Image (cartoon, rainbow, N blue to C red):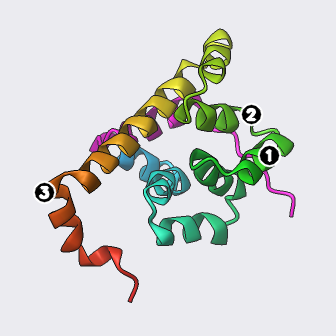
Amino acid sequence: MKPKLKKYSKEAIEMFTAHVHENPEGFNWLVNNGYMELAAVIDAIRDDKKAFDFLMNNKFYILAAFVNAVWEDEKAFKFLMDHKAYDWAACANIINGDDKAREALLRLKKTHWVNLALAIQLRIQQDGDRNVSPWGVLQNMFNFKKYDR
């Protein structure tokens, strides 16, 4: 299995970041420009099994590894490094609190990757807050879409 490393333009990463921030313009741009896989990444990070399956079934192995690396899966991180997906690996490391990864991307003038990492990190924190607040727990209890039937 030799995954192809798809190159994403700065604009694609910026629109992905906008989508992570729940900006409809970002999602629409991704869909209209053939980047459905990027739209699926944030859902997969948020534990949407169908989104993760979409990535795997369509052979977006780098993005699937990124999803797992965000959750500190060492094998997934190694996969990213072995396949020269350095920007994705650095992004995952930033999400996991690695200041050196952030500094490296900034030094390389890849601010858009840092912004993406920070947006995903914020979204994960917001999801966590929803899961522990009394109102969030109630909402999750009645969110029947989450349960596999």
Q: Secondary structure at mark 3?
A: helix
Q: Which residue is mark 2?
A: 86
Tell me which residue sits at (80%, 40%) in the image: 81
Mark 1 residue crowding within 10 angstroms, few (<14) / some (14–19) / many (20+): some
Task: Give left or right: position of 96 versus 6.
Answer: left
N-terminal of the pair, mark 2 or mark 3, is 2
Please tell me whether residue 15 belongs to the stretch shown in magenta.
Answer: yes
Q: Amino acid at mark 2?
A: Tyr
Picture disc at residue 7 = none
Please tell me whether residue 90 belongs to the stretch shown in magenta.
Answer: no
Q: Secondary structure at mark 1?
A: helix
Residue at the extreme top of the image, as rendered: 107
**Which quadrant of the figure contains the N terminus?**
bottom right
Q: What stretch of residues is rendered in magenta?
A: 1-26
- Residue 139 higher or lower than 95, as above or below: below
Q: Which residue is mark 1?
A: 78
